[in-house]
């Protein structure tokens, strides 16, 4: 037993986090910035943070992750990091030649009180930002919120850097903020939109960035990502679809405030109900019709569920990870007649428990829901030790529990350090739901095949 | 050399053509995509394999999340080191101090996990908000009755190497607290060996066959008890230049234990290491055993390596690893299987290390300190390398460029140390360099310069 030191009995804690179901803000900011074309993320702090963020993203995407660091030393931590940042900008524009630099802070630069807007405007005044090049920034102290917050803050920062109030409104064109989802999911959203022939701008968009093919070249700036032209045009869209309370609404709100673009909240389209709502909202906002091919996909998904419902009914599930995803996932599991029983997120926020509880109530089921401080995987493991579940869904760190407790385990979320595929196979849309459903069924049925007594081993299932 | 940041010209050399005077041990240039990590990272990797201790990261959540069981240091017993413990500081503590939260955390941990000791790592922010971690730990040690040891690893206070030092100081506090008795056989401590993929077990086995007693391994598959009795050993055998030399020096000073500096990568270095230890004790029995062991191992290996050599002859390798000392061993080991090193570099080599490299490498070899992806990808393409030996951040870069790859860092999955390790190393390189996947790689032959697409 790998986690043999985890006792079954739950004793209240106030101080300690054990086996976290979250990480820190800057990595989210870095991920968001990578979804902008020719954008170079820069970490204003000491180099350790940046190295960790890059390593973790590298392990998850199996792609080289480029980002700079201000490389704080003791001097910088006493006198402030202004000189480091200004020198860094100079070097970055000279050597790496990005179109945009996206600066985020770390705990250290926040604590010593570096004023990024002021440093940036100084750099601009003194000509450190070359003609035609841009800089955006976000404040991302990790002692506030989690990686999710960092993502949302950087999306806001990017929008803030480009949003223009516009007289012109391009009718029927919308903005989509997809939330922190995989490149495969962003590609899937694009695919659905293009099947509908709907006009949209998506920000950020990491597809064709973090799922790059092997070509023998290292493209420092791969071809994907939201372009500057698109960013400058965000203010001309008729509305914004913000997918996810935590990851997308703050950016949409920023755009509304600065450029008067109204927004509508939708869940990340995970599973059938949320995808239905997303497509209807997109169709409504763009005037584009939901294509026949999408309807076919939906029908195929429903067909698949109905064929296999007996294997899904009543299965209990423990899920952990990021709030926007968990909300979508909870609804999907409920739609599948499964029972999400433990729902844990390290990221704080009341909306989360409210939404989950409403869903549980609607389906007449009960769950233990916990998020924020001490909502960690140590706690989840204790819950499971007290009452087992049939399935575990979450990031790679669940593998210890899955092994110790012998529970089928679906990897989902961030980070996934030990499997591939998440960059290419989506979990959003009907297609994504089918893929996820297939994986869940495979887990259950493989186990059935493994565990069934010889006399009841079945060929046809 | 052209096309590199001007601040970096003294950290990149072409062997034989440039005047060699490496300006290493310097902080990274701001804005460059450094492959380096921080002080905390250095401490964390050194102490992490101690499996019956709790490793509590005092700071905001990130530092703890990113170092959660990433190193693959194996334990034959307890698995406490695979947990991630963090005080998870919030804004409130950043303003009013985190000492209380730290105290509470330690009390809870001691009660629930009953560890043999607790290491408390300070991260950057602790250095700024000024928590008196030393005091909290001292008090907790008195109250709880186990060692609560502060690790002064604030990230910005130096480089990864300073983190090694901080870890060594933390271990040094433990040494001498044990109540063990002096072993009868000649005994050693193995320093700087972390049991990645079970490497400590291989090395220990050699020494056992030689008739040498192992008092402790620091820190692979290690226990607090063994470390606290490490002062009873006769000799410290230190592997890996950077990480634990300072501990050996401290132990020499305080306990009069001499140390010797070895490497277990490659046949020559492994054999030299074992002979050196045998020679130190001068015991004919041990010397005889060592000779037998080495002869047997090498005779088994030679044929295998020669076969790889024929297949790999003339292939070119780039080496970019943590310390320069490791780079030496790799240069030798690669030569043994017919490969030529065309780039040799490290994140944190020191001057002495670097001064040895030019003699070991052929003219034209690029020697580099604290490099970045843009440079590295240019160099490998310029020098037409077939293989990259590096760590996690270099892997996907190498792959994108169509190079074979060998992880010689935390993420190695098979042991690379000792004689067995050399066989594994050769095999891993062979598999990667000769993989049929490269035949689908149309650009493999006509490599282009990457990153210059504007
Ligand atoms: S905060 Fe400091 S200690 Fe933590 S990862 Fe960053 S540089 Fe290292
Ligand atoms: S928690 Fe703060 S200090 Fe630690 S890695 Fe994240 S940003 Fe760096």
Image: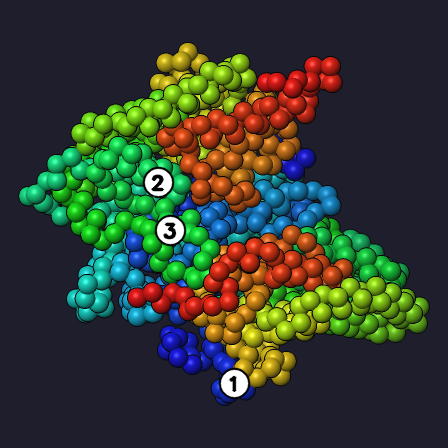
Q: Residues within 10 Å of mark 3 (few under 14, many from 20)?
A: many
Quadrant location of the N terminus of chain B? bottom left
Query: Are both tags, 1 and 3, on one chain?
Result: no
Instruction: Name the foreground residue: A205 vs A125.
Output: A205
Q: Residue B140, percent across and down?
A: 58, 45
The residue to which callout 3 is attached is A209
How many marks overall?
A: 3
- Helix, strand or loop for disc 2: helix
Chain of the residue where label 1 is placed in the rendered structure: B
For the question of whether residue A284 can be seen, the reply is yes
Position of B387 compared to B23: left or right? Answer: right
Instruction: Name the foreground residue: B92 vs B243.
Output: B243
Chain of the residue where label 2 is placed in the rendered structure: A
The residue to which callout 1 is attached is B20
- Helix, strand or loop for disc 3: loop
To which quarter of the image does residue A192 belong?
A: top left
Query: Are both tags, 2 and 1, on one chain?
Result: no
Position of A426 compared to B346: left or right? Answer: left
For the question of whether residue B112 can be seen, the reply is no
Position of B284 compared to A325: left or right? Answer: right
- What is the image's colouring? rainbow
Q: Residues within 10 Å of mark 1 (few under 14, many from 20)?
A: some
What's the residue at 71%, 72% (across, down)? Answer: B336
Label 1 – label 3 distance at C-alpha: 39 Å
The residue to which callout 2 is attached is A186
What's the residue at 33%, 37% (across, down)? Answer: A191
What's the residue at 24%, 58% (across, down)? Answer: A135
Nearest to N terminus: mark 2 or mark 3: 2
Residue B196 disc label: none
Quadrant location of the C terminus of chain B? bottom left
């Amino acid at each position: 037993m790998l986690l043999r030191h985890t006792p079954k009995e739950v004793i209240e804690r106030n101080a300690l986090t054990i086996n976290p179901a979250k990480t820190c803000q800057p990595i989210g900011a870095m991920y968001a910035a990578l979804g902008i074309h020719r954008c170079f993320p820069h970490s204003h702090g000491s180099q350790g943070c940046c190295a960790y963020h890059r390593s973790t993203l590298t392990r998850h995407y199996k792609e080289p992750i480029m980002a700079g660091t201000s490389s704080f030393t003791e001097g910088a931590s006493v006198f402030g990091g202004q000189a480091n940042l200004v020198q860094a900008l100079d070097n970055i524009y000279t050597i790496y030649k990005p179109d945009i630099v996206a600066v985020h802070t770390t705990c250290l630069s926040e604590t010593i009180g570096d004023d990024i807007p002021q440093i940036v405007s100084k750099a601009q005044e003194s000509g450190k930002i070359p003609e035609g090049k841009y800089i955006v920034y976000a404040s991302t102290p990790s002692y506030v919120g989690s990686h999710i917050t960092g993502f949302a803050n950087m999306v806001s920062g990017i929008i803030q850097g480009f949003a223009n109030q516009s007289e012109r409104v391009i009718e029927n064109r919308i903005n989509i903020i997809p939330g922190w989802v995989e490149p495969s999911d962003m590609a899937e959203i694009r695919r659905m939109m293009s099947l509908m022939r709907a006009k949209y701008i998506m920000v950020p968009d990491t597809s064709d960035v973090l799922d790059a093919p092997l070509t023998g070249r290292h493209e420092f700036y791969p071809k994907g990502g939201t372009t500057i032209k698109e960013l400058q045009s965000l203010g001309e869209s008729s509305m914004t679809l913000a997918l996810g309370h935590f990851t997308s609404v703050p950016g949409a709100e920023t755009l509304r405030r600065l450029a008067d673009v109204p927004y509508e909240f939708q869940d990340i389209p995970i599973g059938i109900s949320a995808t239905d709502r997303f497509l209807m909202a997109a169709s409504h906002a763009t005037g584009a019709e939901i294509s026949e091919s999408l309807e076919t996909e939906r029908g195929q998904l429903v067909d698949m569920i109905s064929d296999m419902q007996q294997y899904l009914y009543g299965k209990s599930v423990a899920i952990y990870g990021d709030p926007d995803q968990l909300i979508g996932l909870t609804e999907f599991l409920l739609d599948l007649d499964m029972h999400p029983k433990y729902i844990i997120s390290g990221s704080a926020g009341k909306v989360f428990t409210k939404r989950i509880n409403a869903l549980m109530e609607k389906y007449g089921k009960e769950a233990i829901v916990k998020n924020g401080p001490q909502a960690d995987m140590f706690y989840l493991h204790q819950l499971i030790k007290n009452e087992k579940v049939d399935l575990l869904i979450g990031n790679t760190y669940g593998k210890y529990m899955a092994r110790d407790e012998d529970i089928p385990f679906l990897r989902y979320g961030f980070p996934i350090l030990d499997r591939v595929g998440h960059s290419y196979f989506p979990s959003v849309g009907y297609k994504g739901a089918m893929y996820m459903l297939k994986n869940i069924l495979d887990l259950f049925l493989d186990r059935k095949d493994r565990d069934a007594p010889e006399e009841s081993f079945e060929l046809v299932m | 050399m052209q096309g590199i940041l001007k601040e970096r010209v003294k950290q990149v050399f072409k062997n034989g053509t440039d005047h060699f005077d490496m300006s290493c041990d310097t902080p990274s240039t701001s804005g460059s995509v450094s492959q380096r990590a921080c002080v905390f990272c250095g401490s964390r990797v050194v102490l992490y394999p101690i499996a019956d201790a709790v490793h509590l990261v005092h700071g905001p959540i990130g530092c703890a999340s990113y170092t959660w069981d990433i190193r693959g240091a194996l334990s034959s017993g307890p698995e406490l080191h695979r947990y991630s413990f963090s005080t998870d500081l919030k804004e409130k503590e950043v303003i009013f101090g985190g000492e209380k939260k730290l105290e509470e955390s330690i009390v809870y941990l001691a009660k629930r996990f009953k560890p043999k000791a607790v290491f408390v790592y300070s991260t950057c922010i602790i250095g700024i908000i000024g928590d008196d971690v030393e005091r909290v730990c001292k008090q907790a040690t008195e109250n709880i009755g186990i060692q609560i040891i502060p690790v002064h690893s604030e990230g910005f206070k130096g480089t990864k190497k300073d983190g090694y030092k901080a870890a060594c100081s933390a271990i040094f506090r433990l040494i001498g607290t044990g109540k063990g008795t002096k072993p009868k056989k000649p005994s050693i401590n193995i320093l700087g060996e972390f049991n990645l993929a079970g490497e400590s077990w291989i090395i220990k086995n050699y020494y056992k066959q030689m008739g040498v007693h192992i008092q402790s391994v620091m820190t692979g598959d290690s226990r607090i008890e063994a470390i606290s009795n490490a002062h009873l050993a006769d000799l410290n055998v230190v592997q890996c230049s950077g990480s634990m030399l300072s501990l050996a020096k401290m132990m020499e000073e305080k306990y009069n234990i001499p140390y010797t500096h070895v490497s277990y990568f490659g046949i020559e270095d492994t054999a030299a290491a074992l002979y050196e230890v045998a020679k130190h004790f001068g015991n004919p029995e041990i010397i005889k055993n060592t000779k037998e062991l080495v002869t047997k191992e090498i005779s088994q290996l030679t044929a295998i390596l020669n076969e790889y050599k024929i297949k790999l002859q003339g292939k070119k390798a780039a080496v970019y690893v943590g310390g320069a000392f490791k780079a030496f061993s790799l240069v030798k080991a690669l030569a043994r299987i017919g490969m030529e090193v065309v780039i040799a570099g490290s994140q944190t080599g020191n001057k002495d290390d670097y001064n040895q490299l030019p003699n070991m490498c052929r003219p034209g070899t690029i020697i580099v300190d604290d490099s970045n992806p843009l440079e590295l990808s240019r160099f490998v393409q310029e020098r037409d390398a077939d293989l990259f030996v590096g760590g996690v951040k270099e892997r996907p870069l190498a792959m994108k460029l169509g190079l074979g790859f060998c992880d010689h860092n935390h993420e190695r999955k098979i042991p690379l140390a000792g004689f067995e390790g050399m066989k594994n190393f050769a095999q891993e390189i062979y598999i990667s360099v000769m993989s049929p996947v490269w035949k689908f790689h149309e650009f493999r032959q006509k490599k282009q310069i990457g990153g210059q697409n504007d």
